[in-house]
Amino acid sequence: MHARILRYLDEVVRRGSIRKAAEHLHVAPTAVNRQILDLEAELGAPLFERINRRLRLTPLGEMVLAHVRQTLREHEALRERIEEFKGARRGEVTVAATAGLAGSLMPSLAHEFRQRYPGIVVRVVDLPVAEIAAAVEQGEADLGLGYDLPDAPALRVLATSDWQIGAVVPPGHALAAQPSVLLSECVGYPLVLPAPPLSIRAILDDAFARNAIDVTPAAESTSMALIQRLVMLGGGIALLNPLDIMEERARGALVLVPLRDRYLRRQTLALVARAHGVLSPVAELMAGSIGAALAALFAQGR
């Protein structure tokens, strides 16, 4: 970062001489002079003119000084930000998320976050999609996490990813060994579907309609836990995305087979914050953790 030469040059200009700059910096004048000479040699031109025992910047020196002072300001801002992050070991952060994400992704993520930052209180509130945006806008939550969040000028997107919906079946099911399936193949089995209040249901209903498939669910619910349990008990198959059944897939309790229908769009998961204002250091830490976790999961094709 060349912090020493930047400070030396700035002080020489402020004090008008190498001797006075050296006194202020508590270093030997030869050390300051050596740094200046080395920089001039590197640039291939003088930075100062010597007039009546005072130093005056050359046009090149003026240009370099502007860069030096801008760099010093940015360096100081960085140091302040680092101190803020050091102080972010304590505090609290609130994340508003859909019920499905609050029960699938957030438990492991909050646990890992707390392992790294035990002094930070993590609050996760589960809300309908429409209420997540309002909670963030009104400052009731620092961050919002949900699928297909409505566009709102008062929100800014910090991270986003698109997730493919698949058929969720128990191990040993006739569809479990297939690399992918069609919706038309799924309707031959009892369907346990997310209830209409969930955003994924609108995606599924649109795909069924476009494929001219008439569907009567065997069961439907807003509870991902209930849907998963019904599938594990052999009550039918579900249509969900990989994040909905992270833990169940990890322990081999459920299998997800990707759906390949052309009319079935992916679910867009977004992490949002207020568009105006600055996130607290604690909220920034949580936003970074969520963003990194989503990126890692997406890269794994989960």
Image (spheres, helix red, strand yellow):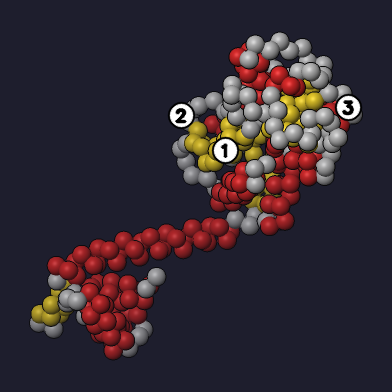
* Residue 165, quarter of picture: top right
Q: Is residue 219 visible?
A: no
Residue ID for mark 3: 234
Amino acid type, callout 3: Gly
Residue ID for mark 1: 161
Amino acid type, callout 1: Ser
C-alpha span from label 2 to label 1: 20 Å
For marks 2 and 1, give the one nearer the viewer. 1
Mark 1 Cα shell of 10 Å, populated few (<14), some (14-19), many (≥20): some
Task: Please say if 181 is above or below 39.
Answer: above
Q: Residue at x 73, y 26 (%)?
A: 239
* Residue 272, quarter of picture: top right
Task: Please say if 225 is above or below 248.
Answer: above
Most foreground residue, 66 or 119: 66
As drawn, the label of residue 153 is 2
Q: Is residue 235 left or right of residue 203?
A: right
